Image (cartoon, rainbow, N blue to C red):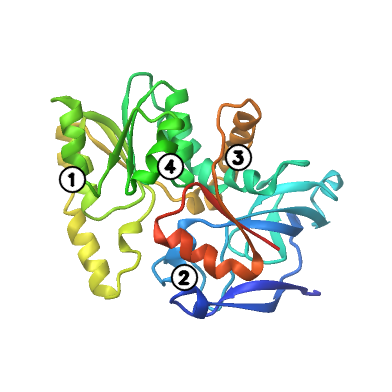
Amino acid sequence: MEKIKTEAIVLVQKGKPEIAFKRLVIELNSLKANEVLIETEAFGLNYADVMARNGLYKEAPAMPCVIGYEVVGTIIQIGKNVDSKWLGERVLAFSRFGGYAKKVISTDQAIVVINDLNSSVALALCTQSVTAFYMVSYIAPIYPGEKVLIHAAAGGVGSILIQLAKYRGATVFAKIGDDNKRELVEKLGADYSINYNHSNYSEQIETILKGSKLDISYNPIGGSSFKDDLKLLGAGGKLFLYGGAALSGKKWGFFSQLNFVKKMGLVIPIGLMMTSKNILGINMLKIADQKPEVLLYCLQQVVELYKKGIIQPQIGGEFQIDSINQAHTLLESGKSMGKITVKW
């Protein structure tokens, strides 16, 4: 069957963006019965992209490959089982990698019509907002009065987590690494902003708690923060792990990974039972693969929450395609706030 040619930003080797990416013409497979072809306007960046570029994300395809989870664009072709109503619609869509391309294949279970919604706002409602919603409102909902710690609170996921947690009645501890981010997280509703570069964040939180404990931690960092968070949690507490940013920037390959695991320590299941604590691993790629209807439901819900004014995505930077290296550098630096997007 005839292949589909398109231009893409291809990840050709690991390392800094300047050497890792090349702009090339690639070929896509012809559409399957339930797939759609999207002419893209823009795509979003996620921290998993940085991990993939550094060779630290095992879910990524073998290089050379095209990464990227989300796009905004117009459907220009459909598979034989897709309703013809989708042709010509402007949509927000998930992609199972492949998002850094001018034409992207998605499925009819991973798209939502957005009409004239700003592309950067729409992209902020995709992977990052869906991840936040899945944790806060779907898999283990927050209840009013619970005390919640949000790591990387000014980032794409963190900024949505703050808003969703406050909407559900939580007290929010927002962990940041720069005082310049304090104004943002407090504007979004954080009750306490904790700068981990001032002093140990767990000690700061213990001082505020005055003997009480946290109910939930949302942790995309891993490493030693995992053990610190477990100590901060009380009975019934939940620790969500949805990333391993503590690995990023490490230069020692296998030894850095070994040290990352060592810092997290050994967790014995019976110990979790005895203390009544919970660890929840979140990988939205696995949810997309095995429960696409759940992913679509979460996507539809966050779009509705935006329309109702309950969440307001934060845009951390809009870049043109020729500046994708700068976009990646900014995201990896830890200095960005909100969603970073790239436009063709």
In terms of depth relative to the viewer, which is nearer, 187 or 133?
187
* Front label number (2 vs 4): 4
Tell me which residue sits at (60%, 75%) in the image: 10
How far, Cα to Cα, is label 1 from label 4?
Answer: 20 Å
Provide the residue designation for mark 2. 53
Q: Secondary structure at mark 3?
A: helix
Instruction: Name the side, left or right, on which 1 lies relative to 234.
Output: right
Provide the residue designation for mark 4. 158
In terms of depth relative to the viewer, which is nearer, 319 or 280?
319
Asked whether residue 329 appears in the rendered view, the answer is yes
Instruction: Name the side, left or right, on which 274 lies relative to 121.
Output: left
Provide the residue designation for mark 1. 200
* Front label number (3 vs 2): 2
Query: Of the residues shown, which amino acid type is indicated by label 3?
Result: Leu
The mark that comes first in sequence, 2 or 1, is: 2
The mark that comes first in sequence, 3 or 2, is: 2
The mark that comes first in sequence, 2 or 4, is: 2
Q: Is residue 107 above or below residue 24?
A: above
- Mark 3 and mark 2 residues within 8 Å of each other at the beta carbon: no
* Front label number (2 vs 1): 1
In terms of depth relative to the viewer, which is nearer, 268 or 96?
96
Report the quarter where the C terminus lies.
bottom right
How far, Cα to Cα, is label 3 from label 2?
Answer: 26 Å
Tell me which residue sits at (73%, 47%) in the image: 91
Provide the residue designation for mark 3. 299
Tell me which residue sits at (46%, 70%) in the image: 53
Q: Position of residue 252 (x, y in %)?
A: 27, 75
